[in-house]
Amino acid sequence: MINAIKQDDIVTDIQSAFADPHMVAKYTEGPPRAVPGYTSMLSMAAILLAERAREDARILVLGAGGGLELKAFAEAQPRWSFDGVDPSAAMLDLARQTLGALASRAQLHQGYIDRAPEGPFDGATCLLTLHFVDAEERHRIASEIHRRLKPGAPFVAAHFSIPAGEDERPIWLQRYSAFLAAAGLAPDKAAAARAAVDAQLSILPPEQDEAILRSAGFSAPTVFYTGFTFRGWVAYA
């Protein structure tokens, strides 16, 4: 999940947006506009999972609210089944709507990683979610995902990640704001979105993100996606 940025709305409290029926109803419009190469990132994630997951794989999707990644994965692999986890009941309801006829292939669980079934799973994803928690909690989540995966199973993660250095963060956040404006968001709203992201998200440098994956038990974390302030990795249990 990511802040639900729209032309007519600006979210100054990012996490509260996922409980706001008005914002939830329009959530699926947001990530394709607010995340560079979002649709292609989902396609790449499905390909990376399929490299090691069997044709009838069971996939864990953490942060499944809205259902966009569930739908993309279900359409890419017609025999996969899914367990989707998200703390927002409203976002899970939206996921069911997004999935439509595909909904029977996904079991949805309200809560955090501790509510996820034990598995073992053939693969897992956590997209646009880990930037909501600090480094310690990120490590715990990654460890819990690792524990639920079969040996060698792929894990795909993507979220805000900005190079280290005191000058890097403002530069990259300004570029993010400029991207939002180029996508059609009014400049003042793009600036407000930048401020909300800066104040409310836990954004780590890529080296720390990779170190967390390794310390949680994953091997060979490799960057597969970079879109301005976002990065994505694949790693293996």
Image (cartoon, grey):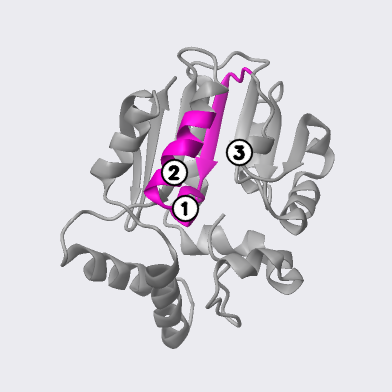
- Residue 163: say if magenta: no
Q: Residue at x 39, y 27 (%)?
A: 235
Residue 147: x, y in percent?
A: 53, 22
Secondary structure type for disc 2: helix
Q: Residue at x 30, y 36 (%)?
A: 210
The residue labelled by disc 3 is 113
Secondary structure type for disc 3: helix
**Mark 3 or mark 1, which is nearer the start of the sequence?**
3
**Mark 2 or mark 1, which is nearer the start of the sequence?**
1
The residue labelled by disc 2 is 138
Label 3 Cα crowd, 10 Å radius (few <14 / some 14-19 / many 20+): some
Q: Is residue 164 visible?
A: yes
Q: Residue at x 66, y 40 (%)?
A: 70
The residue labelled by disc 1 is 133
Q: Residue at x 19, y 63 (%)?
A: 168
Relative to 128, say whether 119 is above or below: above
